[in-house]
Amino acid sequence: MTKLALWERPVTYAAVGATLADDLLRYPPRGYRPIERRVRLGHGENRWDYAWTTAFTWGIQRMAGMRVEKTETPAEVSELTYVPVGYAADGTPVTPATVNSNGESLFGPDGTPFLAPGDTAVLHIRVFGIPFRAPVRVVYVVDEPSRKGFGYGTLPGHPESGEESWIVERSDDGSVWLNVRAFSRPANSGWWMLYPALRILQSVYTRRYTQVLAGRIAA
């Protein structure tokens, strides 16, 4: 039997996009543990630009200590993936502000391409010197004038099953915030035995994500 390429494999959970739900903490997908953390990153245009471009180039994961190995995904697959529509206060749909707004590939300040729905990657994580692989797929991108980020879902081979998102927001007063939301559970019986360790690891990386975006901005 031919082994499917990573981009051909479905995510390992059913509630795709549920990290966007307002009531995630109250009504998470059945059997999953939800988390949410909102942290102020700083203030001003420089902080905003730094935060969202870092998010769109896998910088949050890289700077938190992971190695991100992107895999090639056919363009026709990415074109058919879901991009959530944002709405203004009056109910008017918000046109994408940055990502693929003109059908073009866009890049961060260092030349790294912005991620897009359908992108697939393997996150390489070391725990006490032991390497782990965590395959994921970008399941949606939020691209609004004052709200940007993405969510990814787990693929076969990931220690957990579920979804996690990183959304950077800019308030009317110029303050910049990061919202990290997730729902997860161990992927199989073997990982259930290590569930306490997985929860600690998730908490550690959540703190790292906020430290990355709230740190000093290089000149």
Image: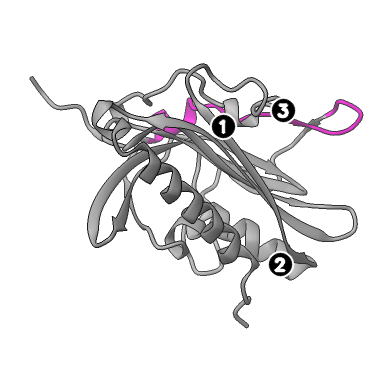
**Residue 34, labelled with which disc?**
1
**Residue 47, labelled with which disc?**
2
Q: CA distance from mark 2 to mark 3?
A: 26 Å
Q: Are marks 2 and 1 in contact (CB under 8 Å)?
A: no
- Magenta part, dominant SS: loop
Q: Quadrant of the N terminus?
A: top left
Q: CA distance from mark 2 to mark 1?
A: 28 Å
The amino acid pointed to by label 1 is Pro
The amino acid pointed to by label 3 is Asp
Residue marked by disc 3 = 22
Q: How dense is the environment of label 1, judged by Cα within 10 Å: few (below 14), some, or many (20 and up)?
A: many
For marks 2 and 1 on the same chain, the one whose residue lies earlier in the sequence: 1
Magenta-colored stretch includes residue 85 = yes
What percent of the width, then of the height, locates residue 211? 58, 65
Q: CA distance from mark 1 to mark 3?
A: 12 Å
Q: How dense is the environment of label 3, judged by Cα within 10 Å: few (below 14), some, or many (20 and up)?
A: few
Q: Is residue 142 left or right of residue 56?
A: right
Question: Which residues lie in the magenta part?
Answer: 75-92
Magenta-colored stretch includes residue 9 = no
Quarter of the figure with residue 18: top right
Q: Is residue 12 left or right of residue 40?
A: left
- 73 or 192, nearer to the observer: 192
The amino acid pointed to by label 2 is Arg
What percent of the width, then of the height, locates residue 161? 39, 30
Name the secondary structure under disc 2: helix
- 26 or 137, nearer to the observer: 26
What percent of the width, then of the height, locates residue 109? 56, 68
